[in-house]
Image (cartoon, grey):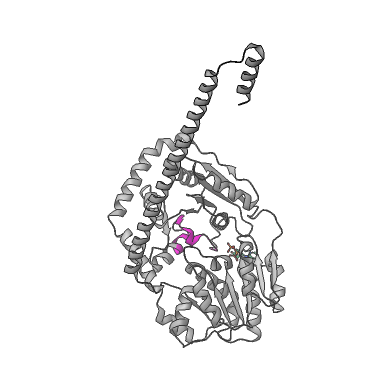
Amino acid sequence: EQVGLRKPTPVQEACIPPALQGRDCMGCAKTGSGKTAAFVLPILQKLSEDPYGIFCLVLTPTRELAYQIAEQFRVLGKPLGLKDCIIVGGMDMVSQALELSRKPHVVIATPGRLADHLRSSNTFSLQKIKFLVLDEADRLLEQGCTDFTQDLEVILAAVPAGRQTMLFSATLTDTLNELKRIAMNQPFFWESTSEVRTVEQLDQRYLLVPEKVKDAYLIHLVQTFQDEHEDWSIIIFTNTCKNCQILNMMLQKFNFPSVALHSMMKQKQRFAALAKFKSSIFKILIATDVAARGLDIPTVQVVINHNTPGLPKIYIHRVGRTARAGRHGIAITLVTQYDIHLVHAIEEQIKMKLQEFSAEEQAVLSILTQVNVVRRECEIKLEGTDFDEKKEINKRKQMILEGKDPDLEEQRKAELAKIRKKNAQFRTQVRQTLEDRRQLLLRRKLQKRARRRHHQQEKPKVAGEKGQDLTSSQAGRR
Ligand SMILES: Nc1ncnc2c1ncn2[C@@H]1O[C@H](COP(=O)(O)OP(=O)(O)OP(=O)(O)O)[C@@H](O)[C@H]1O
């Protein structure tokens, strides 16, 4: 009541009772439907009955999400004097180790950093935890650009088999079999019954645009929202860190209050950017998929997909950053001629059609040259910084963390590329030879046929009408 939660949402109503009975729980509910409180509340209830540390471990794929979940634990666990600890990458490891050794009730972590602690220190133990939560569980199990599976193995080996496991996401179903292996204690599976996989209050649109005019459309859309709405805030999703950086520079050149969020930023910058956006100091957040899942910012009314997501699942999470907890929102996806099949795949998954968004083409064309010039300027400015170099360094750091030698890996990559090139050349040669042979055979066949025809024409005709008829009908059959 103090925090204004008066009626449980369907996922809370369905999952809290079995969780309190001690059963493992898998909850698949739409974005913004209160999945976090669905695991935080029963855990706090059980903790209040038998408080000790470390009682619960929550794993989540991004650092920002870890802080957000910790905040929910703090708010709802305040009356219990809850002690929590956040273990994520990009932050000081020594102070984290110290915090872990003080036995907090709840540890909220990203898998990579927690596994690092488990590998390198013996000042804490997860052997007595009662609850293990995997938030965005499908993301933790899939092998995306960040692969958590090895770290998860380390963590699962460190927690007791008798713990209670809770798995949540808006997109659980395609990883269900793997999840069942993690939640084995009379697992209770709940999925919202609605066929459409996105929330009703979300207006989902697409805008078919030529690739080269995409940025101009984006600027036009943002301008329109700024002109038409007093209190507005937008998340723009794009596909790469570099694009994210460039778009942010572009929007700032056009005097829009924007901040970027991507994995090539320092962790402190990431938190600062998010804090500025959350407090509405900056109205526009440009992000990569690092912000696609879980972030709960009630003021977001608009999501713009600058690129069409390659996977329907990513689309569901991205557009789920608006229209949360019963609010309304709009999502506009910029679709180029090359992405139409992706939209069809999305529509098939979410079980509804996106509606076309109409934009004023003339207004877009009038800013096109200016937008393209600004993009080029921003690209040149970024090339002048060490952005690409940093990316390379980050890649090398990651390899070292994975126990690989970056130089050796590069050598291997170069060799692999050479082999691939050779193979491709060989394949082209084989294809060419086969084609030549096919052509040759065809030519021979045609020549043979021509010769035969010629031969038949030369044949002395049988006297009389009958012979003539026979020859012409044979020719016709042939
Ligand atoms: N019972 C409730 N009544 C009203 N609001 C609620 C209730 N439970 C949670 N909320 C609010 O709903 C919002 C969304 O909740 P939450 O972030 O847990 O969604 P989610 O289902 O985890 O979404 P996602 O799939 O995007 O991670 C939060 O701001 C939360 O405070």
Q: Give the range drawn in magenta.
A: 274-294
Location of residue 134 in the rendering, given as x and y in whole percent from the top left corner: 58, 72
Give the number of callouts.
0
Image position of 164 with respect to 66: above or below: below
Location of residue 377 in the rendering, given as x and y in whole percent from the top left corner: 31, 47
Regarding residue 125, the answer to whether it shows in the image is yes
Image position of 139 with respect to 155: above or below: above
| Quarter of the figure that contains the N terminus | bottom right
- Towards the viewer: 373 or 283: 373
Q: Residue furthest left?
A: 384
Q: Which residue is drawn at 46% across and 88% down?
A: 123
Left or right of residue 108, residue 387 in this image: left
Q: In which quarter of the image is ligand 1?
A: bottom right
Q: Which residue lies furthest to the top in this view?
A: 464
Rendering quarter of residue 182: bottom right
Left or right of residue 78, residue 18 in this image: right
| Quarter of the figure that contains the C terminus | top right
Rendering quarter of residue 433: top left
Location of residue 328 in the rendering, given as x and y in whole percent from the top left corner: 61, 52
Image position of 209 with respect to 16: above or below: above
**Does residue 286 belong to the magenta stretch?**
yes
Regarding residue 2, the answer to whether it shows in the image is no
Image position of 334 with respect to 1: above or below: above
Q: Residue at x 56, y 59 (%)?
A: 298
Location of residue 361 in the rendering, given as x and y in whole percent from the top left corner: 48, 35
